Structures are given as structure tokens and as C-alpha cells.
Amino acid sequence: MTTDVAISAGRAWILAARPKTLTAAVAPVLAGTGLASFHDALAWRPAVAALLGAVLIQIGTNFANDYYDFVRGGDTQERVGPIRVTQAGLLAPRTVWWGMVVALTAAVLVGSYLVWVAGWPIVWIGLASVACAVLYTGGPFPLAYHGLGDVFVFVFFGLIAVGGTFFVQARAWSPDALLAGIGLGALSTAILVVNNLRDIETDARAGKRTLAVRLGPAATKVEYVGAFAVAAMVPVVGVLAFEWPLLSLLALGVLPLCVAPVRTVVGSSDPRELIAALGGTARVVALYGALLAIGLGFG
């Protein structure tokens, strides 16, 4: 996608950061903090640091994707969807690369505080998160180009984001942090599924073998619906198996918001139809994380 509209440098950086995707970073931190409150382990400073670090890593990942997809030929003029600033010529490739470096360096600085608070386990979590932010589309074996993007998102924006947020506050692990991570990981993956379904044809032509390219449109749509089903089961299992408060079922309040994007994805035949579904899915992720946090924290 190209653009003939004049866009300021500040606006270009905002586009590169892809604000709609940041819910995938914020929502699991909210859920992990709500779970810490449920376990009487709420600690605001580590929670805020975890939130800042998660957002910086997400922004750094987005900058990396913008840069590496362009240099690898994954982003072309045929692509449908939000503007990619490198491909559109709004920012120079090297400038975007340095933006990635700055964002991930800032994340490391925030992470050093969390290491001081919670110890060496955070070092390994932080190093893996920063490395995979680059290796998602960069490096000799880019994860997204080999069908591993969905696994990356599920693990890092679900299991690790929720579990890590809980750990820096409680200084311990808990099985129900894994459960909450599954719910947020499933929904965050749904954001990627919509994106990859929209780009399935252009990705295939560019040699970007995403899971959607490998599975095909029909199976990818099943994956998308399945992600919502998994997320809906999580608070129910939490109540039954981990004695979560009944108020945690408040997270199921997102179900009405799921109808429109699911209907769009399942019935889609034109990639342009999926642009609205991407925003709708991001809103579901944000609200699910917030409602689960409220239910766990105040139940």
C-alpha cells in the first residue's frame, strides 16, 4: 500500500508503532496484575514497569516488522491494510531500524528494574522477548516467515506476559497464571490471524509462509473462531478449578463484541473486509484483559 497524502514525521512514527496492536501488550499485563491482586500480591511499581516494558517491546517489534518485511520483500504495493511506513516511503529504512533499537533498548532499561525487583528469571524472560522481537521477521530464520508467528504471539503475549507480570509482583509462579495466559494468548493470536488472513495472497507471493498461508483460508478461519472459544473457557475453568471469584466471569462480557469480527472473518472473501475485523479483534482483547483484571482484583 502506498500513499500520496503528506504525513508528518510524528504521524509516521505513530503509524509505525501500530497503536491498535498495543492492546496485545497491555491486556495481559492488566490480567496478570488482577491475578496478583487476587493472590494478595499486588505491587504497583513492578506492575507499571511491566506495562511500560511490554508496550516498548511491542512497539520495537512493530518497528522491526515494518523494516524487515520491507527489506525481505514481504511488503509490496499490492498489500491491503494499514500503511507500512518503510514501504510507503514515509520513513527511511535505516531510520525505522534505529527506532527499533531505541524502543528495545528502552525496554531493556525498564527490564533492569524488574530484574532488581524479581531476580534472574526476568533476565531470561527479557532477553528472550527482546530477541524474538527482532527474530519474528529478522535474522536468518524469521519466525513469521516459517509459520511460527502464531506460536510466538501465544507464548510471549499470553503465557509469558501474564506469568511474568504476576511473577514480578508475587515473586512466585502460580498455575492459574498459566491459565490466564492461555486466554490472553489465544485472543492476541486472533489479532495476528486476522492480519495474516488478510495478507494471505501477498504473503504467499512474497514467500512469507505464515501459518495462514500453510493452512489456507478455511482452516485459518477455524483457528480464529477457536481462539475466541478458548478465551471464553478460561474464566469458567478458573472459577471451577482455581476458585477464582465469580466476578471473573465478567470477562465473558466481551462475547457480544465478538459477533461482528467473527461474522466478518468467517464470511470474508475480500481482504479489505478484514481491516475492520482487525480493529474489532483488538478491542475484544483490550476489554477481555480489563474485565478479567477487574473480576480477579475486585471479586
Image (spheres, grey):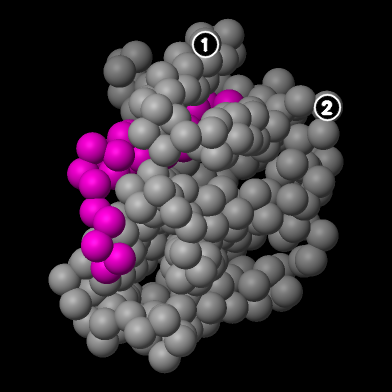
Tell me where residue 108 appears, x and y as whole percent: 47, 23
Which residue is pictured at 23% across the width and 74% down the height?
295
Amino acid carrying label 1: it is Trp
> Residue 87, position in %: x, y?
58, 24
The residue located at (54%, 33%) in the rendering is 120
| Residue 27 rendering spot, x and y as whole percentages | 35, 55
In this view, 186 is above or below 125: below
Quarter of the image for residue 265 reads bottom right
The answer to whether residue 145 is left or right of residue 181 is right
Residue beneath disc 1: 98
Residue shown at 34% from the left, 14% from the top: 9
**Which residue corresponds to mark 2?**
140
Residue 41 magenta: yes
User: Could you tell me which secondary element the residue under label 1 belongs to?
Assistant: helix
Whether residue 29 appears in magenta in the rendering, the answer is: no
The percent position of residue 157, horizontal first and vertical second, equals 51, 51
| 234 lies above or below 136 | below
Name the residue type under label 2. Answer: Pro
Q: Are marks 1 and 2 in contact (CB under 8 Å)?
A: no
User: Neighbour class for label 1 at 10 Å: few (<14), some, many (≥20)?
Assistant: some
